[in-house]
Image: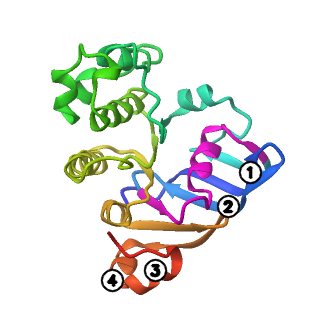
Amino acid sequence: MKDSAVQLRLDHVFAGYGETVVLEDIDIDFSKGESISIIGRNGVGKSTLLETIMGHTTLHRGSVHLGNTEITNLKPYRRVWRGLGYVPQEREIFSSLTVEENLVVAIHNGSGDHQRVYDLFPQLGARRNHMGNQLSGGEQQMLAIGRGLLGNPSVLLMDEPSEGLAPVIVEELQYAMTQLRQQEDMTIVLVEQNSRVALDFAERCVVMNRGQIVRDGPSDELKSKPELLDQLIGVDVI
């Protein structure tokens, strides 16, 4: 942890889709410069948590704060302007635009450094004139992450970045994510189904079940106690 100042806070949040409540009494904060992994079985509310932070769900109760500002009632694009970056599970790149054009549309008010993205992902720099639908799954994920960085976020949310990717590509993404964690002074919240990736990435790991937080503590404890991990989420470390 680089700074004890709270960068993101959810205060007793109940949220979901329409009348359906998925998250129940989520009360958690993330410090400036901290990296956190969120794990759990499928369907327990991990992605809903990120979508709630971004303003994509129905908030039934509670509040969301970014730094010293309450963002509970802000539209998603205004949350991005305030300093949230989001890498969705579906990637959502524009297939009919080039890599360069995908990055350009993510820039707000002239901010954003393409070279920063190309330095992090050299493959994208080499394919900057290729269309989105000409990229591999791994390259599309790199582009989604790069696009999330161009708003110079204070908090970056990443939803299942390793999903569907070959192990060698996952290793490349892990390396890039580690660079971000070490070089950038931003908070990174990673939702990840691959337990090994999640526990290796962040010192702090949050476990969710049935829309609630059931554990919040050091990742090393779960690494050293596979039986505890199995009890919490039903799988061993991959």
Crowding around mark 1 (Cα neighbors within 10 Å: few <14, some 14 to 19, many 20+) is: many
- Marks 1 and 4, the one that precedes in the sequence: 1
Whole-angstrom CA distance, mark 1 to mark 4, is 33 Å
On screen, residue 166 versus residue 82, left or right, reads: left
Q: Residue at x 43, y 56 (%)?
A: 192
Q: Identify residue for label 1.
A: 15
Give yes or no for contact between labels 2 and 1 (Cβ–Cβ under 8 Å). Answer: yes
Q: Nearer the viewer, mark 3 or mark 2?
A: 3
Whole-angstrom CA distance, mark 3 to mark 2, is 23 Å
- Percent coordinates x, y for residue 69 in the rendering: 64, 40
Provide the secondary structure element on which disc 2 rests: strand
Residue 139: mark: none
On screen, residue 133 versus residue 87, left or right, reads: left
| Residue type indicated by callout 3 | Asp
- Percent coordinates x, y for residue 111 in the rendering: 39, 19
| Residue type indicated by callout 2 | Ile
Residue 42 belongs to magenta span:
yes
| Residue type indicated by callout 1 | Ala
Identify the magenta region. 35-59
Q: Identify residue for label 4.
A: 224
Residue 230: mark: 3
- Marks 3 and 2, the one that precedes in the sequence: 2
